[in-house]
């Protein structure tokens, strides 16, 4: 018989399904204890299917911080007036029992929730298969299954603590708070937006539109039968991993143009040597943004020409594995 006093709303953001996989396992573990639980994917507007006395927030760690889309979700919630909350994040692992670094993510989520009136009593993290196909080769199916299986015991312990409302806080490692401010700030305000512009569809693209339809941030549009990314990308890696043709790649030309041009001293090229430093920095930033937008427009048009596409979409990602969590169908 369900314990009606134990109702949980599990708020989930996921890119390739890891956090959703963990949320489903957590929901099952809580329900085995007689509680009621409902999962609310924050990319969908319907919210929780029932009122909840406690909330669990689950998301992947990006650059040692909370994804921007999850922070926006938390910031938009009504004030909680002391409602109980827990945070359970996931990070990428390339082998069982070993993973990345959550950095300041748990403390950042706790602070954001506390600012909305939540009483955060638990923070924890789980290692799941790495999915950053844009940068590295994800684990193959067999290894990914082993990494996922290794998360079962920590997840069970997390469910126990959340059900009993045991106060457990995983602390940020010494020195990682400052590092996380840098990595998280750069990624959130710059990196994720421009990494989305690294993506391009190669000649295997059949215009199915699955990438656009499944993008959790709604940043992919089909134009002329080909996907185009805007500057609001979360860099969640769903598109590159979900494409049935493995047609989405990281264009080396795009990555080079949109990354290295930030190093160009535009104020010197325009004859502004010796100007006030803040003015020079502002001019360089504005010039960089203009160059990026123009380069993106030109490359998008050129990539439509079949004869030019192989050179423009030359990449190192075509031979990499693609990864989606078991049972993930956005």
Image: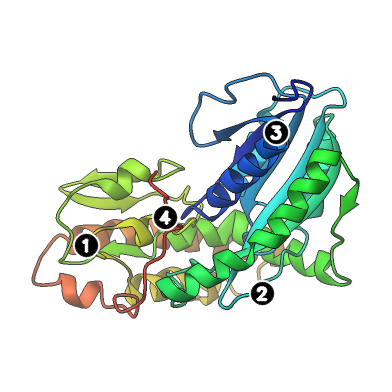
What's the CA distance linking mark 1 and mark 2?
A: 32 Å
Residue 49 higher or lower than 134, as above or below: above
Q: Return the residue at label 1.
A: 245
Q: Are marks 2 and 4 in contact (CB under 8 Å)?
A: no
Residue 44 higher or lower than 218, as above or below: above
What's the CA distance linking mark 1 and mark 3?
A: 37 Å
Q: Which circle's residue, 4 or 3, is located before the other in the chain?
A: 3
Residue 323 placement (x, y as % from top left): 41, 65
Q: Secondary structure at mark 1?
A: loop
Residue 263 higher or lower than 162, as above or below: below
| Discs 2/4, front | 2
Q: Secondary structure at mark 3?
A: helix
| Residue drawn where x is 57% and y is 25% of the image | 47
Q: Secondary structure at mark 2?
A: loop
Q: Is residue 279 visible?
A: no
Residue 98 placement (x, y as % from top left): 66, 76
Q: Which circle's residue, 4 or 1, is located before the other in the chain?
A: 4
| Residue drawn where x is 46% and y is 57% of the image | 325
Q: Which circle's residue, 1 or 3, is located before the other in the chain?
A: 3
Q: Residue 323 shows which numbered tag?
A: none
Residue 115 placement (x, y as % from top left): 83, 35
| Discs 1/3, front | 1
Q: Return the residue at label 4.
A: 238
Q: Return the residue at label 3.
A: 75
Q: Which circle's residue, 1 or 2, is located before the other in the chain?
A: 2
- As drawn, the residue found furthest toward the front would be 1
Q: Return the residue at label 2.
A: 97
| Residue drawn where x is 70% and y is 25% of the image | 2
Q: What's the coloring here?
A: rainbow
């Amino acid at each position: 018989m369900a314990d009606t006093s134990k109702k949980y709303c599990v708020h989930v953001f996921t890119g390739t399904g890891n956090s959703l996989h963990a949320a489903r396992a957590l929901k099952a573990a809580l329900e085995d204890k007689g509680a009621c639980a409902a999962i609310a994917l924050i990319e969908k507007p319907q919210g929780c299917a029932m009122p909840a006395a406690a909330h669990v927030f689950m998301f992947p760690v990006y650059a040692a911080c909370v994804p921007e889309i999850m922070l926006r979700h938390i910031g938009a919630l009504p004030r909680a007036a002391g409602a109980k909350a827990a945070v359970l994040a996931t990070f990428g692992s390339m082998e069982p029992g070993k993973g990345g670094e959550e950095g300041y993510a748990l403390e950042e989520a706790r602070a954001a929730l506390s600012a909305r009136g939540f009483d955060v009593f638990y923070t924890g993290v789980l290692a799941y298969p790495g999915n950053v196909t844009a940068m590295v080769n994800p684990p193959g199916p067999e290894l990914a299954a082993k990494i996922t299986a290794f998360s079962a015991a920590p997840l069970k312990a997390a469910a126990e603590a959340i059900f009993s409302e045991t106060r457990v806080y995983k602390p940020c490692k010494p020195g990682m708070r400052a590092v996380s401010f840098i990595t998280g700030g750069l990624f959130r305000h710059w990196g994720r937006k421009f990494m989305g512009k690294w993506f391009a569809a190669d000649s295997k693209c059949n215009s199915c539109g699955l990438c656009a339809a499944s993008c959790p941030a709604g940043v992919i549009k089909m134009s002329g039968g080909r996907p185009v990314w805007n500057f609001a990308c979360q860099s969640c890696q769903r598109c590159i991993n979900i494409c049935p043709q493995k047609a989405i790649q990281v264009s080396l030309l795009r990555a080079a143009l949109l990354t290295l041009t930030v190093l160009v001293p535009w104020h010197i090229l325009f004859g502004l040597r010796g100007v006030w430093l803040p003015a020079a920095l502002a001019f360089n930033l504005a010039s960089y943004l203009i160059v990026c937008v123009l380069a993106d427009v030109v490359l998008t048009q050129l990539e439509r020409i079949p004869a030019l596409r192989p050179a423009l979409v030359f990449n190192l990602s075509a031979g990499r594995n693609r990864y989606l969590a078991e049972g993930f169908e956005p």
